[in-house]
Amino acid sequence: MASSSPSHCRSVNVEVQMSCVSGVAARIGGCMAHSPQGVQLPMARLTLALVLAAPFCPLAAQQPAPAASPPEGGPSSTAQEPGAGAQLHTGTSSGLDTNARLVNLLADHQYLRIEEQLDQLPRDQAQLYRGILANRSNQLDQSVQLLEPLIDQVTASGNNILEKMLRLTLAEDYLRLGDWARAARAYVTLDDRLHAQLSPGEQDEIEMPLKLLPLARDNPPVTVDPCEPFRLQVSNDPLGLIDVPVFIDARSHSWMLDPTAPFNLISRSIARDVGLEISPRSAIVRTLTGRPIEVHSTVIPRFTIGGRLTLHNVTAFVFDDADYSFPDSGYRVEGILGFSALAAMGRITVSDNTIQVDPAKEIDPQSDQDRLTTGDRFYLDGDQVIVALGRTQDRAADPTSPGNPTGSHGDLGESDDRMFAIDAGGQQTYLTSRWFDEHAAEFNGQKMQTLSFPGMESGSQSAYVAETVPLFIGDRTVDLHYIPVLTQPLGSAARDDVYGVIGVDGLDQLNSYTFDYRTMRFSATGE
């Protein structure tokens, strides 16, 4: 999107509440967002991003040079200051040295730009960043191979920030690989060695794996049967999220699809009804729902998605039914499909209450014909799904153009990509102050409205609503409508460092959208 793109704006009274718990958890804790029409919409969590605050130096800790002060904006532009926990933004960082630029690029999720600089770095530093980028691109075995040999060297350097970054990335690798024992040890070691260096947000980020993985460390690894592509009917639950039909021991259930969930979850009543063995040990976690709850573990011997895709030895964590129930709507969550299930599903295309599944492990793959190679790349940063969307031209200047990038686009390092978080487990779509800073002129003459954030350090905010926001996805432009636009940083790196968050209400405006976890590509078609 370019600042001249014809997004139409109007001001309305909007109130959005945000919390630091997960997408579904925000609903449990009563965290609601109000749409421009006054309809209450639950909000997803504001996860805190990994702090990448130190360049690689094997012997001594180095700190990046301070960033130059941003230029003053016009009368209607708010120069963005990093909030509490937020990272510096890249922009034109000509006053920064190479290490500081890399730190800023990581904070901005500008992975393609980092890739093109790797050959210019010292060997160990390049190895570190290659390992981090492999983690973000879901190339987990490669990330482990690159980062494990650096552990002793980084630990001996005394650089706590760097050690924290390295250990957290490796812990995430083990977790996504389903290596419960190594993941459990990695998180415990991280907390034992560096607890004092972890910010409150980072402590929240690791609370669930730190406490839950010891319950599952002896569980067998999940295995997946080969499967032909298939289509399944899905439904929207009262929260507006997608429920997927699953089978446990030939009994049908509906589980919520949440791409941001690191674990599979199951209600105690369902686990008991199908005869699962529930661990006698338990853990008390807070970040799952925003209040302390007791969680056990279990292993599902046979688990089938849509009656077609079968997984064996699925680790799931057991919650009490009351902790995921909604008395006002009479809705009770039976289970939640997390990352391991999504990875097994391979490529998923959502449209018209159906999901087309092209499994990661097919019976007879046809020379990778079903692998998505168009669209835009997406990345996994902790439990965030980050997609690189390009800018769009001013279509008023060329009304015949469907939307072309103003600069280079695709896999080139110097692209005009703008990073957005996609939260298919959260209802609300909104644009952050980073987007506003590039589009402030479009709101001239509009009346500012107050946006309040109970429980957030940022307090009250000012906001507009953009009637039409064009997004360039792959080779096409899609329009989203009536999107709240924040004008000030939230003080959360996970949100201030992206240009916007696309939730379920934004995804529902698309005809279809596809995630391919095999090629890490995202595509969409508009209405």
Image (cartoon, rainbow, N blue to C red):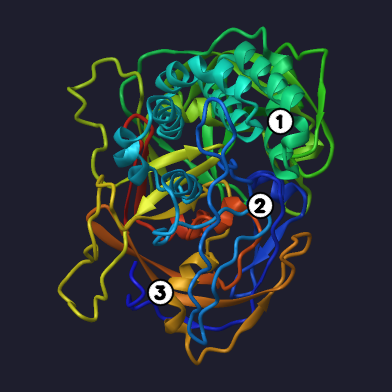
Quadrant that contains the N terminus: bottom left
User: Depth check: 180 or 305 in front?
Assistant: 180
95 on left or right of 170: left
Q: Camera-side residue: 170 or 355?
A: 170
At label 1, the amino acid type is: Met
Q: Residue 15 appears at what percent x and percent y?
A: 68, 71
Label 2, label 3: how far apart the Cα atoms are = 31 Å
Q: Secondary structure at mark 2?
A: loop
Residue drawn at 64 percent across, 69 percent down: 39
Q: Quadrant of the C terminus?
A: bottom left
Check if mark 2's residue and mark 1's residue have beta carbons within 8 Å.
Answer: no
Query: What residue lies at 76% left-to-right and 22% top-to-bottom?
Result: 192
Q: Secondary structure at mark 1?
A: helix
| Image: 95 above or below 291 | below
Q: Is residue 244 above or below residue 512?
A: above
Q: Residues within 10 Å of mark 3 (few under 14, many from 20)?
A: some
Q: Residues within 10 Å of mark 1 (few under 14, many from 20)?
A: some
Q: Position of residue 349 (x, y in %)?
A: 36, 41
Q: Hey, what amino acid is under mark 3?
A: Thr
Of 322 and 204, which appears nearest the observer? Answer: 204
